[in-house]
Amino acid sequence: MRSLITTLVVAAVILILLGLFLKALKWLLILGLIALVASFVLGAVKGRRPSR
């Protein structure tokens, strides 16, 4: 599960950087921010669950 969250964070950072470099494609920035927020939420939800 940790690798999935790490992959989401890396993808989000790449999309954010691409969105910043290519200002014409602002939707990349928006998608990157959404992916970053989703990865933080996933990490928080999975982190609060007791591990078996």
Image: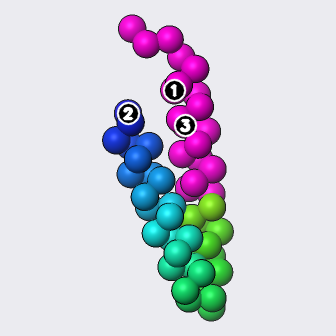
Location of residue 16 in the rendering, given as x and y in whole percent from the top left corner: 56, 70
Task: Indicate left or right for 47 with 6 as reference.
Answer: right
Q: Mark 3 points at which residue?
A: 42
Q: State which quadrant residue 29 falls in.
A: bottom right
Q: Which amino acid does label 2 sit on?
A: Met
Quadrant of the image occupied by residue 52: top left
Q: Which quadrant of the view contains residue 11? A: bottom left
| Location of residue 15 with respect to 9 vertically, above or below | below
Instruction: Report the residue marked by disc 1.
Output: 46
Magenta-drawn stretch contains 49: yes
Query: Tag 3, which secondary structure?
Result: helix
Relative to 51, is 45 above or below? Answer: below
Name which residue lies at 56% across and 55% down. Answer: 35
Residue at coordinates 55% horizontally, 37% vertically from top-left?
Answer: 42
Q: Give left or right: position of 32 versus 6.
A: right
Image height check: is 51 above or below 7?
above
Contact flag, marks 2 and 3 (Cβ < 8 Å): no
Q: Is residue 25 above or below residue 5?
A: below
SS type, badge 2: loop
Q: What is the span of residues highlighted in magenta in the rendered image?
A: 34-52
Residue 21 on image: x %, y %: 55, 86
> Do the residues under discs 1 and 3 have CB atoms within 8 angstroms?
yes
- Looking at the rendered structure, the kind of residue marked 1 is Lys
Q: Determine which residue is flagged by label 2.
A: 1
The CA span between labels 1 and 3 is: 6 Å
Type of residue at label 3?
Leu
C-alpha span from label 2 to label 3: 9 Å
Residue 1 place in picture, x, y as percent: 38, 33
Circle nearer the N terminus (1, 2): 2
